[in-house]
Amino acid sequence: MANHASAKQRIRRNARRTRINSDRIGRIRTFIKRVEAAITSGDKAGAQTALRAAQPEIHRGVTKGVLHRNTANRRLSRLSARVKALS
């Protein structure tokens, strides 16, 4: 347990940031799931629009520090390849 004021403040701040970051990660996952749902249904136009909506959200996760840059690029690359493969 924290014994001085700065440590107690740090605990409160860490809890607040954890909540914010988990919300951000959940939002990113939601956008990715929308793209994957459109891919599995075979809707190429819907998958393309969902991917266009997901791209800035994933990049925002990188700038906010909840995703690594390479992880975001890998996910976008794999999603776009799957969308492109739809006939």
Image (cartoon, rainbow, N blue to C red):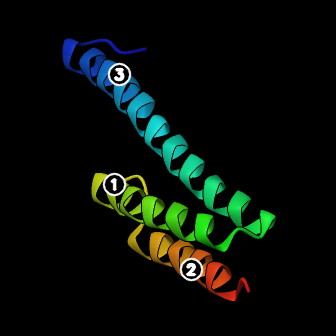
Residue corresponding to mark 3: 11
Q: Residue at x 51, y 64 (%)?
A: 49
Q: Pointer 1: residues within 10 angstroms few (<14), some, or many (20+)?
A: few
Q: Position of residue 40 (x, y in %)?
A: 79, 65
View extreme (right): residue: 41
Q: Nearer the viewer, mark 3 or mark 2?
A: 2
Q: Is residue 41 left or right of residue 46?
A: right
Pick the quarter of the image with the N terminus.
top left
Q: Nearer the viewer, mark 1 or mark 3?
A: 1
Q: Position of residue 10 (x, y in %)?
A: 28, 25
Q: Residue at x 54, y 41 (%)?
A: 26
Residue corresponding to mark 2: 80
- Mark 3 and mark 2: Cα distance apart in space: 40 Å
Q: Nearer the viewer, residue 72 or 13?
A: 72
Q: Residue at x 35, y 22 (%)?
A: 11
Task: Kindly indicate the quadrant of the structure image that contains residue 3.
Answer: top left
Q: Pointer 3: residues within 10 angstroms few (<14), some, or many (20+)?
A: some
- Mark 2 and mark 1: Cα distance apart in space: 23 Å
Q: Earlier in the sequence, mark 2 or mark 1?
A: 1
Q: Residue at x 24, y 13 (%)?
A: 4
Q: Nearer the viewer, residue 7 or 20?
A: 20
Q: How many marks?
A: 3
Residue corresponding to mark 1: 65
Q: Which mark is residue 85?
A: none
Local secondary structure at mark 1:
loop
Q: Position of residue 42 (x, y in %)?
A: 77, 70
- Mark 1 and mark 3: Cα distance apart in space: 19 Å
Q: Amino acid at mark 2?
A: Ser
Q: Amino acid at mark 3?
A: Ile
